[in-house]
Amino acid sequence: MILSFTINGAPQQVDASRAAETLLDYLHDDMNLTGTKLCCGIGVCKACTVSVTKGPSVTPMISCSTPLSVLDGTEIRTIEDIAQGGTLSPIQQEFLSNFSFQCGYCAPGFVMAATVFLDQVARSPIREDQLDQAIADAIGEHICRCTGYVRYYEAVRKVARDVMAQTAEAVK
């Protein structure tokens, strides 16, 4: 049996004998994509978050303990795929503008979770009074050892408001 999935748009086929291997190991060892970070190794810190799409559903997923077996038929995006054509995404730019991170080790996980959150907001807008709780739900379990939480939240809030305004404009 063969497991099939895409990573940053590139089709991958992996023999099922590797089904127990973690996505993070595959990203680092087979794809040489090292932007996704290993920190705790048990899925608590969320530094290793990637975006996984299966059908219409896009979700953030930890890669340090996710076996390849659950990824068959999915599309995976890593931090390396977020900036396009040398231009940072709005959330990456806002994290920089807000000085959200210091050491940067947790930043890829925050960027990926925030990217998924912003995609969900664009698809299914939320009310302004729900925004802070939605941000907490999206990135609240991520660990930043340099304590950049307030700045991460401010950056996500700013971009989410922009997305919400664009979505409202498009509906008019």
Image (cartoon, rainbow, N blue to C red):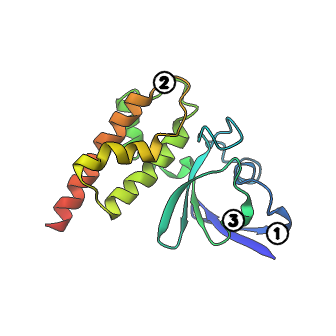
Residue under label 2, please give it.
147
Quarter occupied by residue 88: top left
Relative placement, left or right, of 96 versus 160 is: right
Residue under label 3, please give it.
70
User: Which mark is in front, 1 or 2?
Assistant: 2
Residue under label 1, please give it.
15
Relative placement, left or right, of 74 versus 169 is: right
Tell me the quarter of the image containing the C terminus.
bottom left
Does the rendering let one see residue 98? yes
Q: On residue 55, which mark appears?
A: none
Q: Residue 147: x percent and y percent?
A: 48, 24
Q: Secondary structure at mark 2?
A: loop
User: Which mark is in front, 3 or 1?
Assistant: 3
Name the residue located 47 percent from the left edge and 28 percent from the top edge.
101
Along the polypeptide, which appears first: circle 3 or circle 1?
1
Q: Residue furthest right?
A: 17
Is residue 46 positioned above or below 118 on the image? above
Q: Secondary structure at mark 1?
A: strand
Q: Residue 82: x percent and y percent?
A: 48, 50
Q: Secondary structure at mark 3?
A: helix
What is the distance, in whole Å, between disc 3 and disc 2 at their CAs?
33 Å
Name the residue located 74 percent from the left edge and 65 percent from the top edge.
69
Looking at the rendered structure, the kind of residue marked 1 is Asp
Looking at the rendered structure, the kind of residue marked 2 is Thr
Q: Circles 1 and 2: CB distance less than 8 Å? A: no
Instruction: Say which of 145 and 84 sits in front.
Output: 145
Q: Residue 167: x percent and y percent?
A: 24, 60
Looking at the rendered structure, the kind of residue marked 3 is Val
Q: Residue 21: x percent and y percent?
A: 79, 56
What is the distance, in whole Å, between disc 1 and disc 2 at their CAs?
41 Å
